[in-house]
Amino acid sequence: MQDPSKVFEISSTSVLDLKAELFKQREEFERQKVVAKNQPISAASRKVAKKPGIWERQNKGVLERSHRDELEKVETSTLEASRAAMERKAKLYDHLSKTGISDEILSEEVLVDFDRKAWEQPSEDEPTKEKDKSEDPWVEYVDEFGRTRVARKSEVPKSESPVIGPTIPNDDNEMIPEELLLQRWEEAAKKELNCM
């Protein structure tokens, strides 16, 4: 490669000679091209790009929509196949969780310990805690900071002040908890005044 810092001295006549030689070579090339095709060079011989007619062109986005439709067909078939596989696996899982795995070889391949799961889960015959909670009423009580709380009767701490009563008044014309609380507060205030 030549050194870029090196400057060549070129005269204007040399540049003109180079341009003339280049022009001659182009003309020679065009003549050889015409002889090879055996046709004269003219503007009429050039092909003019025609605009597509009304019936030849497609609407915009037709190819994209058709491609998208093909993808959706593939997706729906894959979705149906995966849904069927998942349903089959769910049935197998339910069966194995109810009966357990008896085959030693199969139990090594399966990653879920169905025997332990069956042991830990309560059976359907046992009474659940939900039934017990329906028998355990909601009550209001006052905690150590004097706040009124609502909780199940079984969850009320024994060290707290006594249970005020159920949050819903009974038909026996019992006082509702706010009235009872107000009455207790008034009694406590009277005792404090009498002590002074």
Image (tube, grey):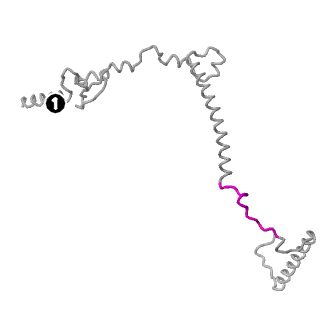
Residue drawn at 51 percent across, 16 percent down:
119
Residue drawn at 29 percent across, 23 percent down:
157
Residue type, label 1: Leu
Q: Which residues are magenta?
A: 46-60
Q: Is residue 157 above or below residue 82?
A: above
Q: Nearer the viewer, residue 181 or 50?
A: 50
Name which quarter of the figure residue 72 lies in: top right
Name which quarter of the figure residue 96 lies in: top right
Quadrant of the snapshot with the C terminus: top left
x and y, in percent, of residue 191 in the image: 9, 28
Q: Nearer the viewer, residue 179 or 3?
A: 179
Q: Is residue 143 above or below residue 102?
A: below
Magenta portion: prevailing SS class:
loop
Residue drawn at 67 percent across, 47 percent down:
66
User: What number of labels is visible?
Assistant: 1
Residue 122 is a magenta residue: no
Residue drawn at 8 percent across, 31 percent down:
193
Quadrant of the snapshot with the N terminus: bottom right
Please indicate whether residue 186 sits to the left or right of residue 159 in the image: left
Please indicate whether residue 92 sits to the left or right of residue 159 in the image: right
Q: Nearer the viewer, residue 130 or 44?
A: 44
Neighbour tally class for label 1: few under 14, some 14-19, many 20 plus, Cα within 10 Å? few
Pointer 1 residue: 182
Name which quarter of the figure residue 108 lies in: top right
